[in-house]
């Protein structure tokens, strides 16, 4: 039962005014110094540590401006309609630190997963659910979601099919509603297949990185990215697979390719939290894009609790911005009006006639709709002024009468 690989033709605005509209990309995130207010660089956080690297601690820099990825996903608008309350997202990664201030009181750790030496799992958990704080621009997608930290790697971030399968099983057994899997493995296994099937059977949505994170540092210069291919568990039936895109909506240079993916989400130079303290890191990779999608899934499941995991995945995909790989749109996923057939127990969307979703009738419901409406009004005003300046004087010269002239006779009538 695979519903995650459907491609849709791009949706177009069929209006000549659309040619006049310009979409400006959101500005990249800015990190400000803690004390001086000067712009500083955020330290980079990778998905694994070398053997001799020390565990990551608090970052000395904080992101006080709103990051580009939050602007791109329209999160401030989406938060008016959903918060993630009542939903648990399991992060199957390097663990999730219980010491992270932005997740305080909302992290439950399975086994030893409450300690995160690498910091990557905590970073992803922050993308899902970090709380907003005064003076800080960064915040997670679903700020009232609970996080279940699950170790899907060894202590230093190395993952295998066995460790990921065990992590997914643990997440399902501990009551997760959504599971974010950061690992993208070159091959699957019977245990991994079984773990995903178990999640599907328990109505748990598994969201996974479609490709591995791109190599960094010296490894990046020495290793050529392989030809596009599938990775696991993302390529498996029942999994929502997510690719990473940059601020311009394109895949980052040097990133891995795949033969199929369901969604694309921000994943190049995104801001996130560390395992300790109030500081921030910057990271890149499809594992982070999967975190954004998992957070969006939490928003949908909190706003529409009657939807199944499969229907949630369908909604995320069907409301995505049309592109080569549809781009995640949490606002549309949360606010789109579902047909009655989307209720729990209804047949899958792929088996129903017609669209599963319809957007609100209000032309100003979204930014594109409002932009077209404003442009249309402006164009109408310009045309009206032009008509009044050119056509009306000519008509007056020829004796045309407007509504105000109908009460009095014309010159010909007076002469007669």
Image: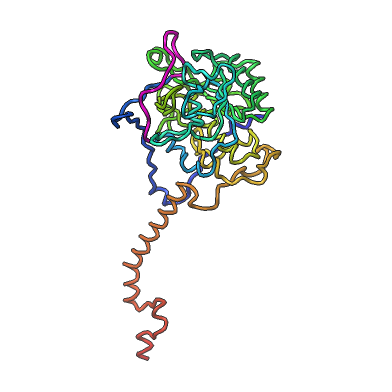
Q: Is residue 155 visible?
A: yes
| Residue at 34% from the left image edge and 64% from the top image edge | 385
**Extent of the magenta region:** 46-65
Q: Is residue 183 visible?
A: no
Q: How many marks?
A: 0
In the displayed structure, would residue 144 be above or below residue 170?
below
From the top left corner, tell me how far across and down residue 248 is, in percent: 40, 34
Q: Quadrant of the C terminus?
A: bottom left
From the top left corner, tell me how far across and down residue 85 is, in percent: 57, 37
User: Which is nearer the eye, 292 or 108?
Assistant: 108
Is 416 left, or right, of 100 in this rendering? left
Visual colour scheme: rainbow
User: Which is nearer the eye, 397 or 356?
Assistant: 356
| Residue at 61% from the left image edge and 43% from the top image edge | 355
| Residue at 50% from the left image edge and 52% from the top image edge | 363
Is 242 left, or right, of 197 in this rendering? left
In the displayed structure, would residue 378 be above or below residue 110?
below
What is the quadrant of residue 111 in the picture?
top right
What is the quadrant of residue 251 in the picture?
top left
Q: Quadrant of the N terminus?
A: top right
Q: Residue furthest top?
A: 52
């Amino acid at each position: 039962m695979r519903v995650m690989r459907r491609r849709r033709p791009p949706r177009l605005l069929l209006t000549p005014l659309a040619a006049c509209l310009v979409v400006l990309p959101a500005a990249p995130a800015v990190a400000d110094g803690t004390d001086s207010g000067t712009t500083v660089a955020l330290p980079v956080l990778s998905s694994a540590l070398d053997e001799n690297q020390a565990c990551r601690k608090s970052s000395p820099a904080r992101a006080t401006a709103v990051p580009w990825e939050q602007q791109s996903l329209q999160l401030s608008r989406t938060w008016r309609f959903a918060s993630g309350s009542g939903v648990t997202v399991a992060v199957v990664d390097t663990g999730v630190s219980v010491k992270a201030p932005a997740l305080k009181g909302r992290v439950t750790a399975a086994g030893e997963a409450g300690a995160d030496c690498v910091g990557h799992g905590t970073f992803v958990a922050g993308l899902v659910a970090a709380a907003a704080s005064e003076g800080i621009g960064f915040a997670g997608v679903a700020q009232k979601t609970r996080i279940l930290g699950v170790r899907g790697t060894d202590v230093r971030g190395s993952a295998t099919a066995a460790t990921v399968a065990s992590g997914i099983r643990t997440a399902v057994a501990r009551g997760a509603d959504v599971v974010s899997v950061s690992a993208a493995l070159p091959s699957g296994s019977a245990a991994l297949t079984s773990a995903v099937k178990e999640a599907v059977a328990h109505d748990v949505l598994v969201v996974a990185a479609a490709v591995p994170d791109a190599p960094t540092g010296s490894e990046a210069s020495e290793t050529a990215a392989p030809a596009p291919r599938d990775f696991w568990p993302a390529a498996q039936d029942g999994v929502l697979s997510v690719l990473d895109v940059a601020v311009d909506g394109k895949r980052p240079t040097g990133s891995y390719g795949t033969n199929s993916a369901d969604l694309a989400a921000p994943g190049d130079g995104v801001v996130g939290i560390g395992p300790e303290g109030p500081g921030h890191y910057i990271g890149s990779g499809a594992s982070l894009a999967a975190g954004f999608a998992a957070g969006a899934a939490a928003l949908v499941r909190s706003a529409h609790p009657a939807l199944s995991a499969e229907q949630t995945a369908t909604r995320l995909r069907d409301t995505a911005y049309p592109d080569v790989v549809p781009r995640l749109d949490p606002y549309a996923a949360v606010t789109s009006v579902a047909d009655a057939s989307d209720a729990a127990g209804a047949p899958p969307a792929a088996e129903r006639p017609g669209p599963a979703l319809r957007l609100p009738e209000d032309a100003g419901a979204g930014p594109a709709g409002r932009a077209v409406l404003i442009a249309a009004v402006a164009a109408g005003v310009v045309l009206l002024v032009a008509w009044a300046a050119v056509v009306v004087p000519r008509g007056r010269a020829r004796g045309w009468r407007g509504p105000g002239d109908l009460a009095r006779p014309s010159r010909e009538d007076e002469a007669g």
